[in-house]
Amino acid sequence: MTQPTPVISDDTRLLLHRLADKLDALRPNAAMSEGIRLGQALVLAEQLHGPTEAAYAAEQDLLAATPPVRDRQTRAEYAALLRLIAEGVRQ
């Protein structure tokens, strides 16, 4: 049985691409971590919306759209995964 593809908002799609771009631009071969995933979600949401309730909602939506980091996954590998998610490709 297949699961329906979750609907991703335009804001979430934008933030997925921004996070992927950031991961690719800075140390793409370094290890990705959950701390980076969690911290960057807040930073990027606040860059988009300022310190508002909209930023909190955007952060939560972004975290819901991003998968947990796998062991030994690089930042570039995670960035590629985020781009697929933004384009609606199922994992």
Image (cartoon, grey):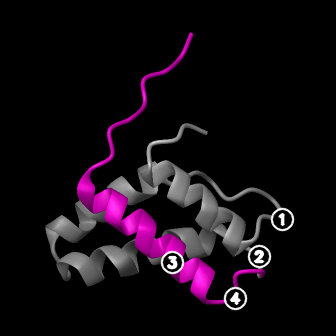
**Tag on residue 27?**
4
Cα–Cα gap, marks 2 and 3: 16 Å
Give the left or right position of residue 83, taking residue 31 as reference.
Answer: left
Q: Which residue is mark 2?
A: 31
Q: Say which quarter of the image contains residue 73.
A: bottom right
Q: Which residue is mark 1?
A: 72
- Residue 59: x and y in percent read 34, 64
- Residue 21: which numbered mark, if any? 3
Mark 1 to mark 4: distance in Å? 14 Å
In this view of the protein, can residue 54 be seen by the observer? yes
Query: Which image quarter holds the C terminus?
Result: top right
- Give the residue displayed 19% in from the left and 76% down from the top: 49
Dot 2, how many residues are within 10 Å of its Cα: few (below 14), some (14-19), or many (20+)? some
How many residues crowd around disc 4 within 10 Å: few (fewer than 14), some, or many (20 or more)? few
Q: Dot 1, how many residues are within 10 Å of its Cα: few (below 14), some (14-19), or many (20+)?
A: few
Kindly report the distance in space between the C-alpha atoms of the residues bearing marks 1 and 3.
Answer: 20 Å
> Residues in magenta?
1-29
Q: Secondary structure at mark 4?
A: loop
